[in-house]
Image (spheres, coloured by chain):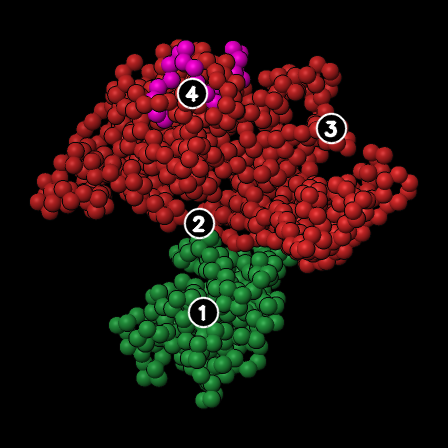
Amino acid sequence: MLKKDFILRNPLRLMGHETEEILTEGEFGAVLARAGVGKTAFLVQLALNNMLRNKNVLHISLDDPVKKVSLWYEDLFQNIANKYNVKEADQLWETILPHRFIMTFKIEGFSVPKLTERLTDLTEQGIFFPQMILIDGLPFDETVRKPLSGLKVLAKNHSIHVWFAVRIHRHEKPDQDGMPLPLSQIADLFEVAIQLQPIEKEIHVKALKGGTAPSDHPALLLDPSTMLIKDTTGNIY
Amino acid sequence: MKNDIQNVRNIGISAHIDAGKTTLTERILYYTRRIHAIHDVKGKDGVGATMDFMELEKERGITITSAATYCEWQDHKINIIDTPGHVDFTIEVERSLRVLDGGILVLCSVGGVQSQSITVDQQMARYKVPCIAFINKCDRSGANPLRVIDQLKEKLGHNAVAVQIPIGLEADFNGVVDLVSMKAIYFDGNSGEHVRIEDLPQDLLSEAITKREELIDAASIFSDELTEAALEDKVTEDLLIAAIRKATITREMTPVFMGSAYKNKGIQPLLDAVTKLLPCPSDVENQALDMNNDEASVSLSSDPVKPLVALAFKLEDGPYGQLTYIRVYQGALSRGDTILNVRTGKKVKVGRVVRIHADQMEDIELIPAGYIGALFGIDCASGDTFVIPGISLTMTSMHVPDPVISLAIVPKDNKAGNNMSKALARFTKEDPTFKTYVSDETGDTIISGMGELHLEVYIERMRREYNAEVTTGAPRVAYRETITRMAEFNYIHKKQTGGAGQFGRVAGYMEPVAGEDFVFENKITGGAIPTQFIPSCEKSFRKCLAKGPLMEFPITGIRVVINDGQSHSVDSSDMAFRAAARGAFLEGYAKAKPVIHEPIMKVVVETPTEFQGAVMGSLNQRRGMIVGTQDEGRMCVIEAQVPLADMFGYSTVLRSATQGKAQFTMEFANYRQVPQAITEELAKKAAEEKKNVA
């Protein structure tokens, strides 16, 4: 199993994103779900997919320490490798690892100027040039538009696209368009929104905005045991 | 000597470098009246703290050897092992933890849980050592013990619960509130020796009540009695302490104490906690392996009447000969006893038995089960088990990592040469991670260990303690060779040059194997190679591994399978098949895409945020791959994987890049393939060296 085979399993192809890039420069994507449903797992799979295509991913976590974020990557990579019986997974892992950079902040310590400063540290010294950013743990409250607008500028300046994990709550009703509350006021900033919805024992992957699955494709699910994305026929991606 | 085992505590003090554990130990010894004056680690008075008794430690302000010391508090006998904080000496820490029943995890109230605290905590977990935490330096600016408690929970996963809260902080730090007795404790006198207990200050009352409730909540999970008492609002001190103790011993709770060792505050309550909350030797179950019964594990009981089982956990060369620190797990060890070293099978007679207090000692008659003491004139290595003749139990062996760095040393003159040999013999006995051998090619003495500092310290010790001046070569990294794909071989060794001929054919394949150094498999059928020659083949393959054909580094991770061959009734011999296997190996190896692997270190730097860019730059320049950065307010932690070969002299670079405000720890992570450019450089260097030797 080589990188190429992994790439073919890009799950979002099945959501109508036939091209390699789901988001283009400066665009935002959101993965929405309730706590514990699998937002981080989903984001990490997007990241792994990019890393396998030699694209640099900057993973920003406002919740977890570096060690825990690394564990997510290791576990999910190992799960995929086991599923496909990859013999030289260790070697493959080492070749993709330099494409990832983890930054963690305290929630109260995170700000766009600070991130810009860190990013400059990295790029000016030629240490790391991210092509995709994941932000996990940013609170999507009423004040979020400001940092998001700042991030939008940052993303455009650095030609980066950004994915966010957005936590939604059971008691909050979606708006008229079906958009969950945290995103309803700021949906204009996002090009793609995907919701992970637990229905009985399965977690369904549902496109809320951007990209519609062709009807002949099976729906996507997140396997709760391995946290890997699969389709309804059981194929893992 | 009173021998009530309930009143014995064998504890260790573990922490990140500079968290203040030596100062803390010093204060403990002062309050327990083992010493009569207090000295600092970096002693301005030129005396130095009592526990850092090696000259070198005094100079560097770090603790290298874990000296054992003894003291008494409230009718309890406490043996303290002062453990080194630097990761280069981790084997010392691990060895100490092996013999401990409990530990004090010292954390800095400003720095909090630092990278080394994580390593030490993992080691404590490995040996299941229950611990209490002491948040030190509450007088320093930026002190925030509550944040440290959160870090204990988040970073180390401890169920950390405050048993005290501070009265004032930073320059106003005055004392602590004991949440069990709900009293304020102050420390008066020049050295804090007078403990004054008062009622709670009004301004802390509501915080103290909340925190006490949290403590009771946390402890009541482990005691039904306490839960009932809490419901009826009848919680007594004894009930609460019993519940906390129960949870502490099972490592389900980490009670947190606070103070400032340097300012003599909070030490006496900590000592009370050691006696009240940490386990006595009989609370801990220790296991030994029965050598006569396929190494089945046997539980030991700390009964002084049972047959003796004791572990030598530390050796030191003192002015009166070898001093062996020993922990007795079962039975008792008395002067004049004859004991058996299980590893060597030799019997030895016990001469002097002493109790150690840093570099002073007192003679005692015996060491009963559960105690730590020292013996004189016993020839053994560190980690040896002693028993009474007739039983053969051994304490489980300790995990010893392979060395990752080596250095050639040459004595300045003949006298230094003799002294150097003595020193090396001693060091290798004391420290299993320190190894030495003589290079076949250059005739140089090579020493190897766990890091640059590790070797440096031994070189210094050679000079100071053994008067052996040596010059050192450049440090060498322990590179390895390995193959990356399967390759077949089929080699015929044939020689007919008069006299007896030589003939042998060896065929098969080799392939990479993970997690093993060498695997040999014989799949010969039909006697293509006669059975008696198979061991010759294996031996020859094994010999080839010592020095790889690529660059003469040892080969690891290889599986050799032989499945065919040929022999001659007259000309085949052990020698012929050895030569054939060697030829076969070289043939296969060349086709198997051999590569060089180098040790990669996990480097963790803690630096003030303003230097983050500079530090990342310095790591990047050293071929480092930065795994991540963790922002923690004023400080940030950078984790990277850097080849050991590029880490030499990093401490100086880091110091100058950060005005000395950053610190780093380094430990071995894994082996990884060397990039092509570096391989070429290595090849060039190897060729040059060969030329020089020739």
Q: Residues within 10 Å of mark 4 (few under 14, many from 20)?
A: some
Q: Residue furthest bottom?
A: A215
Of circles 2 and 1, the one toward us is 1
Q: Is residue A187 visible?
A: no
Horizontal and vertical percent position of residue B496: 89, 45
Are circles 2 and 3 on residues that touch, CB within 8 Å?
A: no
Q: Name the amino acid type tagged 2.
A: Glu
| Residue B216: % across, % down | 19, 43
Using the image, name the chain to which the residue with label 2 belongs.
B
Which is more N-terminal, label 3 or label 2?
3
- Structural distance between the alpha carbons of marks 4 and 2: 57 Å
Q: Mark 3 or mark 4, which is nearer the start of the sequence?
A: 4
- Mark 2 vs mark 3: give the one in front: 3
Q: Which residue is denoted by mark 4 in the rendering? A: B389
Q: CA distance from mark 1 to mark 3?
A: 56 Å
Chain given the colour red: B
Q: Residues within 10 Å of mark 1 (few under 14, many from 20)?
A: many
Q: Which residue is mark 1?
A: A228
Q: Which residue is mark 2?
A: B632
Q: Is residue B325 magenta?
A: yes
Letter of the chain that mark 1 sits on in the rendering = A
- Height in image: B211 above or below B398? below
Q: Nearer the viewer, residue B316 or B326?
A: B326
Residue found 42% across the figure and 79% down from its top = A232
Answer whether labels 4 and 3 touch (C-beta < 8 Å): no
Q: Is residue B462 above or below residue B203?
A: above
SS assignment at label 2 = strand
Distance of mark 1 from mark 4, alpha carbons? Answer: 59 Å
Q: Which residue is mark 3?
A: B444
Q: Kindly give the residue lying farthest to the right in the view shown.
A: B498
Nearer to the camera, B76 or B366 = B366
Element at badge 3?
A: loop
